[in-house]
Image: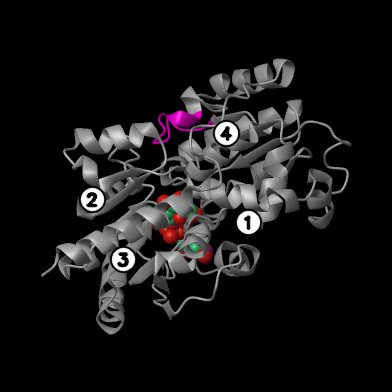
Amino acid sequence: YRIACVVAARPNLMKMAPLLRAFAAPETQVETVLIHTGQHYDADMDGQFFGALELAAPDFRLEVGSASHAVQTAEVMRRFEPVLAQTAPHAVLVVGDVNSTLACALTAAKRNIPVLHVEAGLRSFDRAMPEEINRVLTDHLSDLLFTSEASATSNLLREGLPAQRIHFVGNVMIDTLLRQLPAAPSAAEVLRHAHLAGFVPDGGPYALLTLHRPSNVDDPRRLRALMATMVKLSDDLPVLFPLHPRTRAMLHQHELAGMLDVPRLACLPPLSYLNMLGLMKHACVVLTDSGGVQEETTVLRVPCLTLRDNTERPVTVTEGSNAIAGRDPSVILALCRDILRFGGKSGRIPPYWDGQAAGRVAAATTNWLQSRRERRP
Ligand code: UD1
C-alpha cells in the first residue's frame, strides 16, 4: 500500500515523525510518500526540525508559502492534485488543523482517495478560530479518524460520524516528546547558548511564554494588553518569550517591541525542539496559546496557563496541568502568583499518551486497507 503523508507547518513535524517511523515497520506493508506544502518555510520554523526529529527529506515540496487563507488553501490544492495523480496513493494521511490539512483532505476526497486524519475530533467550538473550520471540515471528509482524547471521540459521534471510522489511539505528539525527552538540555544550557547566562538565577523559577494565535496577536489593543501583563509578570519572575514569526511581525508593525525592553523579559528566536523541551520541562509556569504546548506541559506535569477563552484539548484541563486563564491581566497575574507561591497543579497523564500512539495508527490503518481490499471484487 502507498500512503501520501502531508506536512505543512511546525507542529505537523512532531506529529508526522513517529507516524512515518511506525509505517516503516515491515508488517504494516505500507510505503509512505512525504509531501511538504511549505506553509512554514524558515529554517527556524521548519528546516532545523527535520534532522532533530529524524524526518526524511520530503519527496515533494509544494512551496506555497504565506498568503491569505483562501489563497493559501487554494494554492495547496492546486499543487497537491498533480502529486496525487503522479503517486496514486491508496490513502492520504493528514495531521492537525492547519490550512494545508484541510486543503489536502479536500483534494484527496474529490479524487475519491480515502483520507486518514490524525488528531481528529478536537473542538474549541469557536468558529472565529481558523483552525476550528479546518478541524470540522477535515473530519467530515475523512475515512479514518484517529483521536487523542475521549472528548474528541464524543465530538465526532455527536456530529454523526460513524463509530467504525473512529479509533482512539492516543497522542502522537507525545510519542515524539517521550522519545526526545532524555536528550533535552537543562534550562541553564539553553540560556547559555542564547547568550542569556545568568538571566535566570541558578535553578530559580522562570516563566516561559509562547503566543501566536491571530486572536491574541493580530489585534494591537489585545496584544498591547497581553504584553503589558507580561512586563508586570517579569517583576515577579524572569519571563522567556520565544517569538513566533507572526508575533514578531505584529509587535513591529504595531510598534510594541519597545515595551518589551525590560530587564527580566527576554525575547528569543523560535527555538529548536529540544531547547523548547528543556525550557518547558524546567519552567515554573508556561503561558501559551498553542495547542501542542498544552499537551506537552501536561505530560511534563508543569503548570500551564492557556491565554485563551477555550481549549479544544479539554483533557489537559480535566486530567492534566493546564488551566484556562483567559486574557484578563489581573486574572493571569493572580494565577501566576498562586503558582509561584504554592506550586501549580501537576495533574495526571491522560490515557494512551504513552509513546505508542503512532503504532496504533499504523496497525489500524493496515487492517482497514486490508479489509477494503478484501471487500472489493
Ligand atoms: C499556522 C497554523 C496554526 C498553527 C501554527 C503553528 C493555519 C491557519 N494556522 O499558524 O494552526 O498552530 O501555524 O506555528 O494553518 N512566517 C514566517 N516564516 C515561516 C512561516 C510563517 O515568517 O516559516 C510568517 C508568515 O509570513 C506570516 C506569519 O508568519 O506572516 C504567520 O504564518 P501563517 O502561516 O499565517 O500561520 P501561523 O500563525 O504560523
In the rendered image, which residue does mark 1 sit on?
Answer: 270
Location of residue 257 with respect to 36 vertically, above or below? above
Residue 248 spot, x, y in % from top left = 57, 54
Depth-wise, is mark 2 or mark 3 nearer the camera?
A: 3
Badge 3 element = strand
Depth-wise, is mark 4 or mark 3 nearer the camera?
A: 3
**Range shown magenta:** 306-316
Amino acid carrying label 2: it is: Leu
Depth-wise, is mark 2 or mark 4 nearer the camera?
A: 4
Badge 1 element = loop
Amino acid carrying label 1: it is: Pro
Q: Looking at this view, is 280 or 45 the one in front?
A: 280
Left or right of residue 291: residue 343: right
Kindly indicate the quadrant of the structure image that contains residue 122: top left
Q: Earlier in the sequence, mark 1 or mark 2?
A: 2
Numbered mark located on residue 137 in the image: 2
Q: Earlier in the sequence, mark 2 or mark 4?
A: 2
Residue 214 spot, x, y in % from top left = 42, 46
Depth-wise, is mark 1 or mark 4 nearer the camera?
A: 4
Numbered mark located on residue 92 in the image: 3
